[in-house]
Image (cartoon, rainbow, N blue to C red):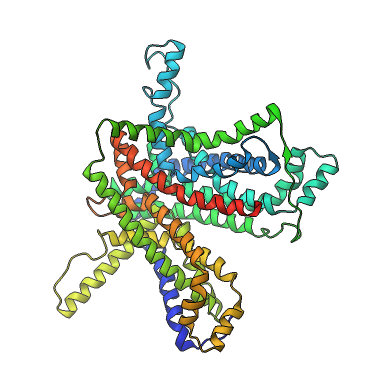
Amino acid sequence: MTASTGPARTWPWHAGMAATALVVLAPILALVGLSGQGPGAHWAHLLQFVLPDALGQTILLLAGVGVLAAILGVGCAWLVTAYTFPGQRILSWALLLPLAVPTYIIAYAYLDILHPIGPVQTAIRGLLGYGGPREFRLPDLRNLPGAILLMAFVLYPYVYLTTRSMFATQAGQLIEAARVLGRSPWGAFFHAALPLARPAIAVGLALVLLETLNDIGASEFLGVQTLTVAIYTTWVTRSDLAGAAQIALAALLIVSSLILLERYGRRHLRFTGSRRAAVLRPQRLRGARGWLAAGLGFTPVVIGFAAPAAYLLALALERLQAGQWPSAGLWRAAGQTLSVAALATIVTLLLGLVVTWSRRIMARAPVWQQQMPRLATLGYALPGTILAIGLLFSLMGLEQGLSWLRAATGLTPTGLILLGTPTALVLAYVIRFLAIPVGTLESGLDRIPGTFEQAARSMGETVNGTLWRVHLPMLRPALAASALLIFVDAMKELPATLLLRPMNFETLATWLYGEAARGSYEEGAIAALGIVAVGLLPVVLLSRVLDRPNR
């Protein structure tokens, strides 16, 4: 605990935290209010014609991606933890690489790679002696099984991350005891390691399902009519905002169920054996078994990262070698992406610091006030389309209030201030990614003993001075990691950007989406490659963090 601080000195921090939590809650409350504005016939139409198919495909997509991602993530985590084989050390961090590829980019790349006249099918027909697509073609990728396959190979690292961390830190004596009692390595896995890792698997799986539900680009490219796609088409195509809000409420119920799944998985997360548990000693695989293990381990890396990244790089180089440099529109989209992502990163970091420091200096606060930091992180659980609809309605109300205020005070109308401007995008990114700095900075602050603050306070330092001179220097690594993750996530964000961006305002993600919708893959490959290159930065950071316990 920290030294007590006077309310006159801490109230600005608590007020800032309360205001931040209110901003995060506003889109959710607005969504509920907006859904009730549509006529009853809307619900009847949605329940009869839209929701059954969209809900059914969403559930099937979530189930398929969840099962396959769990198999890939848990299997790869156990493989690199319990065995050593050729390439095992490289594989341990290479399995994270698919995190650098957003789902809409892998769908974009594979639609071109596996096109009937694409490189793969053309090569197969050449080897088999067929003349054209009419004589031989592979099954179409644009269906639910194709979406499940591609999205699982991108999202499995979430399960791999949490599960490998559990395997690496849990009690090695239990695994050794199972082997001494005659269990095979796989028997020890199923009877000792897997039961202990179930909470970590549940947490990773919840993240996979949330990302799957948030997806709009891959689902639309692959012809899967999910709830997220239905929200977008109802709003943009039919101009039915109330109907889109009603569909969003159905999606919000699924989100709530996934959050409950994560909480259920976290309830026993600390059950990991003794503090000084023995590290699991990996078994060496030699000869053909070792190379087979390496081949199985690198398969998800090739499918989820290497193949699409290499293809995008080849397309980009081919275009550049032909003298076709990126257009002015693409450069403008890149600049707008960087500026919006950078501004969102700065604002999110500042608000995250307000929330975490307010929680740190909170003493004997009521229960409702202690929950404010948790409310401020709810935005990460909201899919981009749901957040965009709720935020749009909130901003509409705010714009009307500002317009009335200007009229009442005799000021000249200035038009829209938030709606239809990049400010709305920045606000959406802040709400969606505020959980990143809050979680990271809370973890960093928890490692700083309260005696540091007590010593500073006893020497006459103020609350703000304690933060500035004592804590911020020690929080630099956490601040840098948070800034990197926020910046990359903001660059990759597609659903909220599609719905809230101003007219003629493109980011790299929306530029790629437009190119794929038009079927022009050449210049879209450059935008996709830029997003993947930036996405590699947090993967490198994660790989260093994972490798630290082994050192």
Can residue 47 be seen in the rendering of this structure?
no
Whether residue 258 sits left or right of residue 136 in the image: it is right
Q: Is residue 29 above or below residue 153?
A: below
> Vertical placement of 549 versus 187: above or below?
below
- Residue occupying the point 27% across, 49% down: 333
Q: Is residue 128 visible?
A: yes
For the N terminus, the quadrant is bottom right
List x then y, in percent, for residue 278.
Answer: 76, 53
User: Residue 287 versus residue 442: which sits nearer the camera?
Assistant: 287
Whole-percent x, y for residue 178 in the image: 81, 45
Residue furthest to the front? 551
Residue at the image point whose x is 32% and y is 57% from the top: 340
In the rendered image, residue 191, in percent from the top left (x then y), is placed at 76, 44
Q: Residue at x 52, y 63 (%)?
A: 440
Which quadrant of the structure image shows residue 523? top left
Asked if residue 427 lies left or right of residue 214, the reply is left
**Residue toward you, 83 or 255:** 83
The one of 5 and 327 positioned closer to us in this rendering: 327
Quarter of the image for residue 456 reads bottom right
Figure check: 513 above or below 379: above
Q: Position of residue 257 (x, y in %)?
A: 54, 54
In the picture as drawn, the residue positioned furthest to the right comes out as 181
